[in-house]
Image (spheres, helix red, strand yellow):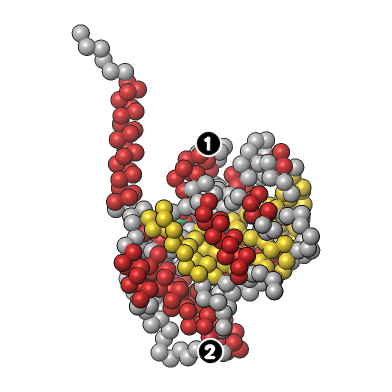
Amino acid sequence: MSKAKPRWFIIVLVLLGLISVATFWLYAWGPYRLVSLDRLALAAAAPKALLRPSDEIPNTLEWTQRRTSVLQALETEIYGRFPEETRALVVRRQPIPAERAGGIAGVEQLEVEAPNGVRFNLVLVVPSTDGPAPVIVMQNFCGNQAAFPGRPSSIAPPTNYYPIPCRYGAFDPLHRAVFGEWMLGPPYERIVARGYAVAMFYGGDVVPDHAPDAGPALQRLHADGALAAWAWTHARVIDVLETDPRIDQQRIIAWGQSRFGKVALLAAASDLRIDAVVAFQSGRGGDALTSHRAGESVEAITQTYPHWFSPRYSRYAANDPEVDQHDLLTLIAPRPLFIGHAVRDSWADPAGAYQAMAGAGPIFDALNAPAPVFSMRTGAHGIVDRDWTTSLDFLDRSLARP
Ligand code: GCU
């Protein structure tokens, strides 16, 4: 008589089957499809003539005046209103010992408040080097506690909604396996050893990254989209950094990946106190031309993340955009700009990003600025070790003191 197969055996088989199907889908049709390098080469060889015929390449003074109207157009068409311009203050400062901050030394937790009632936690890691340190301002996906993993922890978790897989750290290994080692937080020790400080926040403390909760938060701030609200939060972080003598005010960097890459670009476009930008795989609504129509569609992004943008942006699903993402990139000139992509991230539309960069090129040239750097690595969406090496090397080169 044959023995019945144990039930767990069937469960494992079904799970393995599901994982294989999901992986196959991701790599064959889904977001991790291989980007056709031919397409990228084509984009490189024939950048679109994006400056409108009436646009003449401006001199520096004209450009300073013109950038306000470009920013306004981007707000009206894509990102919506920003929260009111104001200055934030530190209301509480707490040094955190390494054993309660994931083993990282030199950590401070700051409670920051803006006059419009916004409160959020900022975690600072400052090198103990002589003289003021350049600083990398960034936000994280799962809360500050996950960006400094380890127990026991004195790093405060988010104050609002945050995704269940981000709680308790149970899914952290999975996050890292899928999206790379540094997806939830950066390699602080390596960054600090190279002389940089890190200023880390969770944007969900200001506007939760969840449509039902984002609506009321945006209303309170008189803002239309979370990307603009998070870019505004970058500016509030800089208010605080400006009062810190340990920070080099000429070397403030906005660093972001994916949705936070979109935010880093927008933050720098709207705040001239930012001196350089690093944006990885920012794609639709970030560095990729909407008019390129590849990868994530406007329809998909505005349906899944309606709280990120101005409601007007959804019109671009069918209509030609009046302003496009190269306009956003021009607002970063003449400051150093690094754009990173991955060959297995067709969702973020690397060729569209290349075209936007090429479209912004004439403004960088006219302002005698170094051309933006475009980097394409192997692998998929996420942050791997190499991304930190390339971005720190880029920052060393482009922000070097004479
Ligand atoms: C989704 C979204 C992208 C975004 C990404 C991320 O994939 O569609 O636009 O960049 O999430 O933030 O990881």
Q: Which residue is mark 1?
A: 170
Q: In the image, what residue type sits under mark 2?
A: Pro
User: Above or below — where is 297 with respect to 369?
Assistant: above
Task: Work out whether 9 lies above or below 235.
Answer: above
Quarter-of-image position of residue 132: bottom right
Q: Residue at x 59, y 51 (%)?
A: 186
The front one of 384 and 315 is 384
Q: Nearer the viewer, residue 98 or 377?
A: 377
> Does the image show residue 384?
yes
Dot 1 beta carbon under 8 Å from ligand 1: no
Could you classify mark 2 by the number of other residues whose Cα lies within 10 Å: few (under 14), some (14-19), or many (20 or more)?
A: some
Camera-side mark, 1 or 2: 2
Residue drawn 56% across the image and 57% down it:
389
Label 2 belongs to which residue? Answer: 58
Q: Position of residue 250 (x, y in %)?
A: 70, 71
Left or right of residue 394, residue 8 in this image: left
Which one is nearer the viewer's eye here, 64 or 106? 106
* Near-viewer residue (97 or 166): 97
Q: Quadrant of residue 276?
A: bottom right
Quadrant of the displayed image that contains ligand 1: bottom left
Amino acid at the residue labelled 1: Ala
Question: Does any atom of ligand 1 lie closer than 8 Å to the CB of label 2?
Answer: no
Which residue is at 31% across, 67% downward? 38
Percent x, y for residue 49? 38, 82
Q: Quadrant of the N terminus?
A: top left
- Compare marks 1 and 2 and give the one earlier in the sequence: 2
